[in-house]
């Protein structure tokens, strides 16, 4: 089911948005993974799934996304974990930890919601609760995307069917490496790393498209 959804999604994204991926070689072949990514559009779980290959993940998604029956069926089918946004959802954290302890992967959007202007938002400290409790041998992999906000911005009921999207997979951290200076510094490091990756994608996209994509805006501003 994962391969079918990923294969069809990849074909659609490549045809419509001239997808450009890099960094896939940074993905660990073994050990559990926590993917952490910026959040630009409704496409994002699909986009993170494209470069990860045979290291699929259980995404943690807010409970309101499970209300439509068809969407709930698809999301449960690919292992999505339901989270009540703004609340301490012990059950969701336990499910995520059980996935990691079994050697599998979990995906998080530390911003907690989609960007409203293309720039990277603040990271919620709750993400560190899962990282601190994760198995010691877990890898945390930063993922950055750019262009998704332009094709499906917050507030739009449907996406544009043209544009450019790019994804970058960064060098993984071990849990101890990330936490060596404390959880606050770890959160700052993740945010700065992902934003630098995003801005590099933005610069490269402008070069490849002659400055046409992405549109100028708040996304041009670093942290």
Image (cartoon, rainbow, N blue to C red):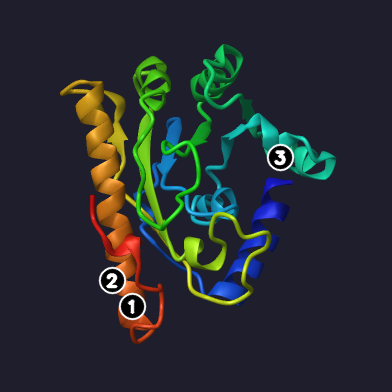
Q: Residue at x 69, y 38 (%)?
A: 65
Q: What element does badge 3 sit on?
A: helix
Work out whether 68 lies above or below 153. Answer: above
Q: Residue at x 61, y 75 (%)?
A: 16
- Residue picked out by circle 3: 75
Q: CB atoms at circles 2 and 1 under 8 Å apart?
A: yes
Question: Badge 3 local density, few (<14 within 10 Å), some, or many (20+)?
Answer: some
Question: Residue 203 shows which numbered tag?
Answer: 2
- Report which quarter residue 180 is drawn in: top left
Marks 1/3: CA–CA distance: 34 Å
Q: What element does badge 2 sit on?
A: helix
Work out whether 95 lies above or below 40. Answer: above
178 to the left or right of 215: left
Where is residue 101? Give x, y as percent: 50, 19
* N-terminal label among 1 and 3: 3
* N-terminal label among 2 and 3: 3
- Report which quarter residue 140 is drawn in: top left
Q: CB atoms at circles 1 and 3 under 8 Å apart?
A: no
Marks 2/1: CA–CA distance: 5 Å
Question: Given this view, does label 1 or label 3 mark the residue nearer the observer?
Answer: 1
Where is residue 30? Give x, y as percent: 43, 36
Where is residue 26? Give x, y as percent: 34, 50
- Residue picked out by circle 1: 206
Which residue is outermost to the right? 69
């Amino acid at each position: 089911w994962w391969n079918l959804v990923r294969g069809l999604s990849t074909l659609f994204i490549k045809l419509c948005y001239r997808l450009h991926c890099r960094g896939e070689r940074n993905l660990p072949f073994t050990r559990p993974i926590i993917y952490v990514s910026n959040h630009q559009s409704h496409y994002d779980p699909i986009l993170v799934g494209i470069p990860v290959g045979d290291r699929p993940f259980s995404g943690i998604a807010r409970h309101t996304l499970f209300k439509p029956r068809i969407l709930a069926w698809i999301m449960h089918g690919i292992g999505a974990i339901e989270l009540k946004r703004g609340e301490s959802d012990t059950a969701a954290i336990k499910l995520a930890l059980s996935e990691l302890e079994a050697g599998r992967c979990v995906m998080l959007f530390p911003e907690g919601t989609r960007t409203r202007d293309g720039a990277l938002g603040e990271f919620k400290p709750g993400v560190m609760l899962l990282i601190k409790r994760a198995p010691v041998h877990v890898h945390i992999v930063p993922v950055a995307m750019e262009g998704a906000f332009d094709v499906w911005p917050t507030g739009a009921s449907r996406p544009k069917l043209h544009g450019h999207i790019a994804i970058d997979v960064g060098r993984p951290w071990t849990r101890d490496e990330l936490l060596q200076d404390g959880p606050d510094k770890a959160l700052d490091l993740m945010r700065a790393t992902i934003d630098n990756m995003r801005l590099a994608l933005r610069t490269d996209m402008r070069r490849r498209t002659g400055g046409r994509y992405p549109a100028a805006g708040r996304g041009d501003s670093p942290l």
